[in-house]
Image: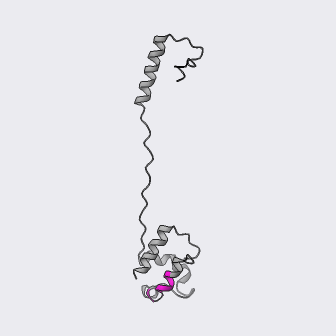
Amino acid sequence: AAVESNQMPPGGGLTEPDKTRLIAYLSKLIAETPQASPTPTPTPTPVSYSFDTAKVLCTGCHGKNQRRPQLTTIDQWRDKKTKILNAVKDKSMPRGKELTEAERGALVRFIESL
């Protein structure tokens, strides 16, 4: 555009045939320059919990010799399933842990599966 409008090269000085050749050359360079491919949108990693991964969220506070209820065994989780499920759904648990909606949803599905 700058060559076409005589802004480049500074001071003008190009004949019309030179200007035409320079524009053709620059157009060819632009066409050959690889364009950056768009950054792919990352695919979210599916979140899931097993008993071992879910209890890590809770045993910091509900482990042995800590707050009641203790949640160190699968049977303890099953006995308190409704209470745990409600606390996870209303976001009062796990305390001090920021869960994404996907993580919270996965935790709810795990608890419902008990």
Determine the main secondary structure of the stretch shown in magenta: helix
Judged left or right of residue 110, residue 68 is right
Q: Is residue 86 magenta?
A: no
Residue 10, image x, y percentages: 59, 17
Residue at x 43% of width, y 37% of height: 35
**Above or below — where is 62 with respect to 28?**
below
Judged left or right of residue 95, residue 41 is left
Residue at x 46% of width, y 76% of height: 108
Residue 58, image x, y percentages: 52, 79
Q: Residue 49: which quarter of the image? A: bottom left
Bounds of the magenta span? 78-85
- In which quadrant of the rendered image does the C terminus lie? bottom left
| Colouring method of the image | one colour
Q: Is residue 84 magenta?
A: yes
**Above or below — where is 97 with respect to 7?**
below
How many numbered callouts?
Answer: 0
Residue at x 51% of width, y 76% of height: 57
Residue 93, image x, y percentages: 55, 78
Q: Residue extending furthest front?
A: 5
**Above or below — where is 99 with respect to 70?**
above
Residue 9, image x, y percentages: 56, 17
Q: Nearer the viewer, residue 1 or 69?
A: 1
**Above or below — where is 85 with respect to 6?**
below
Residue at x 49% of width, y 81% of height: 85
Q: Residue 53: which quarter of the image? A: bottom left
